Amino acid sequence: MTEAVSISFRITEPMMFRGPGEFDPFVRGTYSRALTLAIPSPSTVAGTLATYCISELGKTAPSSVDWLEKYLSVLGSDVEIRGPLIKLNCELMAEDRLSGGFLTLEKIKQKCEKEWKKLSQKANSLKQLDENLKKEKFEPSVEVEKNVRAGVRLQTREGIPMKSAKEGFLYGAEYIDYIGKRGKKTGEPSVEIIAEIRGELVKSLSSARELPVKFGGEGRVALLSFQQGEEILSEIKERLWNDQEKHYGFLAIYLATPTLFKGGVRVEKYVKQWAENMNYRFVGLSGESALLSTGFMIREERRKPIYTSFSPGSIIFLEGSFDLLGIYHDKTLSQASMLGYGTYIPIPIANNTSDSEDAC
């Protein structure tokens, strides 16, 4: 692989990363509400990086091409983004949308092992015990804190230097507050959104300064910086792979970002076909699917496509002989994977005779 650069957005205030749904009083009635995701989508990170490339590096984007080609025309056809993940007080974490929070790498491994045990028991027809396990809630390492602020649209009266409230245009804006109550307990908390960049683009990314950029919705600001090296992969290698890049047996693939599929086919069918193409045996899935929009193109005033997604926190179980590094860099399962969608965290499952027999 080419040299990697780690990109960081340092967060200093509550943020809004627009979630699904319309934010328009004509659609929702007299009161509308903008929802936020717990972490920016890969499109948000790629879009902010593309804006940096246009404003700072002088690159240009065509106006009438496919949304993905537009990104690649600025970032480079060989770009590979992994992430985003979040770093809270120097602890790397990934989103678990199913539990509504973030998991440390150790917690991700625990969740994969727990779901593997449930899958093994289900295969062995231990139905009652499996149902009891399903009722247990997997607690996130850090829960998401959100707050809502009410507002009203203002209008300026023509010819009069004053503003007044426009009738019927009340709205609520939801923000993700990473610091929240934790900041009062820990002093000065450190919050960063982290991603890895590979490709020819890395030669143009400088680590010499920290640059304020608009990040997400509502004109919120984060501090953008670059650092040579693969921060995410290095921690995964050390803490989950024991610095080994080969594994034989069972493997759990934790989805750290949404995995996108074209609609019309069940997620399981896509994953089975991918596993077959990769010469792995598909064992099972754990998680949930949903419809997901990849955002809005402001310049063209139109939405990007809507896909079927496998949500962050979902897990794919496989059996075979694995090149862990190859799986981490794989871009063949998810649509728009070069932008960070379908970022995997491969977790080797300890070989156990009883588990192996049960899951087959």
Image (tube, rainbow, N blue to C red):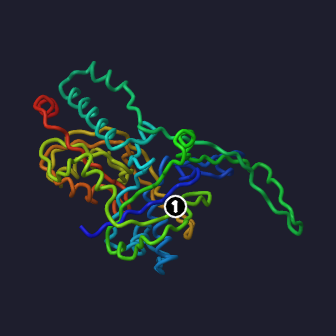
Q: Which residue is mark 1?
A: 303
Q: Is residue 182 above or below residue 213?
A: above
Q: Amino acid at mark 1?
A: Arg
240 and 126: which is toward the camera:
240
Q: Is residue 127 above or below residue 223?
A: above
Residue at the extreme right: 160
Residue depicted at 43% across the width and 50% down the height: 87
Residue 121 point in image, percent of width and height: 21, 26
3 and 342: which is toward the camera:
3
Q: Is residue 233 above or below residue 77?
A: above
For the C terminus, give its image quadrant. Answer: top left
Q: Secondary structure at mark 1?
A: strand
| Number of other residues with Cα within 10 Å of mark 1, as a class: few under 14, some 14 to 19, many 20 or more | few
Residue 337, image quadrant: bottom left
Residue depicted at 50% across the width and 70% down the height: 51
Horizontally, residue 100 falls left or right of residue 243, namely: right
207 and 332: which is toward the camera:
207
Residue 218 point in image, percent of width and height: 62, 57
Q: Is residue 177 above or below residue 159?
A: above
Residue at the extreme bottom: 58
